[in-house]
Amino acid sequence: MSSPRVAVLVPVHDQSAFLARALDGLLAQHLTDWEAVVLDDGSPDPEVVREVVAALPHPRLRLLHWPVNRGLGAALNAGLDATAAPLVAYLPADDVWSAAHLTALVGSLADPGVALARTGLTEPAGTPYAQLVQVAHRRTPDRWTERAELETDDLDRLFWRRVGARGRTAETGSVTCTWTRHPGQRSRAIRESADGGLNVFRSRYRVAQPLRFASTDGGEVDEVARYARFRTQEHPPADGLSVLLVGELALNPERVLALRERGHRLTGLWTTDGLGDATVGPLPFGHVPDLDRDRWPDAVRELRPDLVWAQLNWRAVPFAHAVQSAFPDLPFVWHFKEAPQRSLVRGEWPLLADLVRRADACLFATDEERDWFAGALRGRVDPRRLGVLDGDLPKRDWLDAPLGRKLSADDGEPHTAVVGRPSGLDAAWVLELARSGVHTHLYGQVRAPGPKGAWTGWLAEALASAPEHVHLHPAVGPEDWVTELSRYDAGWLHRFSSDNGGDLRRASWDDLNSPARLPVLLAAGLPLLQQANPGSAVAVERVLRRDGTGLFYRSAAEVAVVLAAELATRRGAAAALAVREEHTFDAHADRLVELFASLTR
């Protein structure tokens, strides 16, 4: 047999069910002078991977296995190190080659000026970069970027750009491979447009360290830098309560360290059905070890916690209910932020109602949400066990940053900020604001399903029509909230019309909710723009009127008027700075601990 001309790298993690199909396509190649290595990067079923490789014996097919997932870059680099052929091709375990695939790629690489070649796919991937399955390249000293430096779906950033810079990129002109679209793809775990994101990725691959993370349809997050202050923080001995956190921690997960700072021991048990921005463990700031999720009932029995603190949003409901049912004698606090309407739509209202009914105590984000549950479960739940505490308040530490200089101090025009999805805004509204001289600065827009990505239909029009008054910025993290966002004059909350007429039975999610952006904007000293809904029960409107932090309007013209008054007086900004401490989790941690202690006596 001739020496191998092509090294074939076959990465596999949780796609063992596809592996035999992929290897069958490898063995069917017209070009036979290859060597191949299956790279089992911590598969949950390594015995299946071994069985598949053993069932297809070939002298140039080998298996490398690691018990813990190290990431795509590390696996592929190990494959490069384990092979020697001058050309390298890729066959992910869930993809397929036709018999002419290697022949086509090697033919394009026969030109010495070509560094990288790619074939067509039977179905377009819809990504701006080439997929592994369609690419072959010359062996070079270049190596794949590994997890410690960056995790991203962008293969150009991980490798193609470097190796492609060494020569031309050639298209074979033929379609010889299939990129298999399915829910378990790595790229789908990363991209929010596929219901993925940082925490979906973390959970699937059980990543134990903070991530530097980027997706091609969203922004970038550097958890290493963001959470450095917490990872090195010294805490008092954990001789207080043993608290088992169950579910997910949403957008401000480091808030739970307020309990660790008070000497309580925290342990995590996380749902596997979270959202990309709903934080699950291993927590990137440390100090909260995880239970083994594969044997969690036994692990909970071994831990013997003092109580369960389950949270937070509708995605956590099924798992929180499962834990509650498995341990009915453990003191159980259900902390719920949003949204009962989603549980109704998903058919999970019976589970949510049962959680509230059986919990020793329940905490809700707003008075209105508490009262909604009290009414919906009248006669089934003791209202005295229902309390109010927004479960996703940020940690106070982020407030310790300098305020920035107002943009309006230089141009005299009002500047407003949108953090997260521009709920209720559209091109007509933003352009009417622009005609009144009002600037709209949008932060962290991502291409995602549902309302989170609704901006994609109008933002291009707004940017083209009013480029001097509509501005797009990358997401701003908590470390920069105060300094970055304080440059503006006001922040946008959700724009919506309420028609509940004061009847909570008719209340919508917007009526009951306390938006996560509320404490973020208050941290920067911004008053909040909120559409007035007279005659309706709206939680956030009540809070803004109580604290004097709201700028209320009914039309875009009124927005310009209230902003002009704010620039003249700065009353809203002063009120925001006066109450921002109350909108941190630390301000309420002692009250929460008192509740926990009362349930464990």
Image: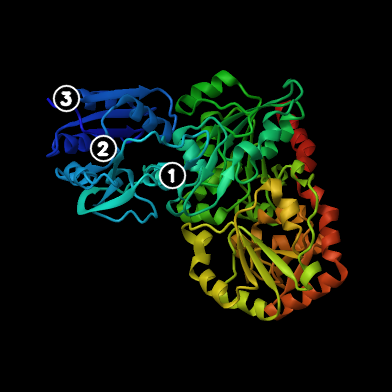
Q: Quadrant of the C terminus?
A: top right
Q: Nearer the viewer, residue 517 or 389?
A: 517
- The residue pinned by badge 3 equals 58
User: Mark number for residue 189?
Assistant: 1
Question: Where is 67 relative to 99, above or below?
Answer: above
Q: Earlier in the sequence, mark 3 or mark 1?
A: 3
The nearer-to-camera label among 3 and 1 is 3
The residue sitting at 46% across, 58% down in the picture is: 449
Residues marked 3 and 1 touching at CB (< 8 Å): no
Given the image, on which type of amino acid does mark 2 rest? Phe
User: Which residue corresponds to the image point at 64% horizontal and 52% vertical from the top-left?
Assistant: 476
- Number of marks present in the image shown: 3
Q: Judging from the image, what secondary structure is the residue with disc 1 in? A: helix
Q: CA distance from mark 3 to mark 1?
A: 33 Å
Residue 92: x, y in percent?
30, 38
What's the residue type where badge 1 is placed? Ala
Question: Could you tell which of marks 1 and 2 lies nearer the N-terminus?
Answer: 2
Instruction: Please report contact status of discs 3 and 2: CB closer than 8 Å, yes or no.
Output: no
Q: Amino acid at mark 3?
A: His
Q: Residue 270 at x, y = what percent?
A: 53, 35
Instruction: Give whichever of 548, 566 is nearer the camera.
Output: 566
Q: Is residue 394 left or right of residue 43?
A: right
Q: Is residue 268 left or right of residue 519?
A: left
Residue 405 drawn at (x, y percent): 80, 59
Q: Which residue position holds label 2?
A: 18
Q: Residue at x 15, y 45 (%)?
A: 100
Instruction: Select label 3 or label 2 by which is in front.
Output: 3
